[in-house]
Amino acid sequence: QAQPVESGGGSVEAGGSLRLSCAASGYINNDYCLGWFRQAAGKEREGVASVYIRSDVKHYKDSVAGRFTIFQDSAKSILYLQMNNLKPDDSGMYYCAARSVNLGCASGSWRLWANDHKNWGQGTQVSVSA
């Protein structure tokens, strides 16, 4: 599988919005869990949101619930992360990832996923100023 290609990051003021995209050819099928992760400077990579394609069940980090929305365009094999009401703590490099749903999709699986995942893309930088 090819590395995913993330895009859509940028610099915004607090309260602004961004929509991230992830070109994930070959990843978006019904048996996959797709996720967005982020890594702030000096911190570990953490899960932000995930979705199980077959059921469309979604999971969000508590601090982004109600502000971020994960969704996909299966026909185009693109995963999105709509981010509204951005806060400075949302700043970081954002990455997308995919794996078999058999390995878990809920937030409890994110830490191990982040540690074990190998096929990270280049990411897209999000910077939110106060």
Image (spheres, grey):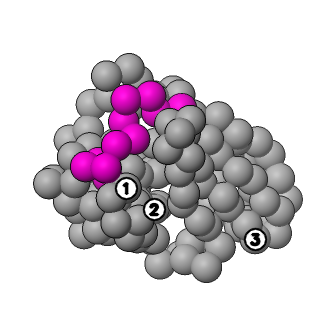
- What residue is at 76 percent from the left and 42 percent from the top? 10
- What residue is at 46 percent from the left and 51 percent from the top? 36
| Magenta segment includes 25 | yes
Q: Badge 3, how many Cα within 10 Å: few under 14, some, many 20+?
A: some
Q: Secondary structure at mark 3?
A: loop
| Nearest to N terminus: mark 3 or mark 1 | 1
| Magenta segment includes 45 | no
Q: Is residue 58 above or below residue 46?
A: below
Coordinates of residue 26 in the picture (x, y in percent) = 37, 29
Q: Is residue 44 left or right of residue 127?
A: left
Prevalent SS, magenta region: loop
Tell me if residue 54 can be seen.
Answer: yes
Q: Which residue is mark 3?
A: 85
Tell me if residue 123 can be seen.
Answer: no
Q: Name the image quarter holding the C terminus.
A: bottom right
Distance of label 2 from label 1 (alpha carbons)? 13 Å
Q: Name the image quarter holding the N terminus.
A: top left
Q: Badge 1, how many Cα within 10 Å: few under 14, some, many 20+?
A: some
> Residue 81's quadrant in the figure?
bottom right
Distance of label 2 from label 3 (alpha carbons)? 16 Å
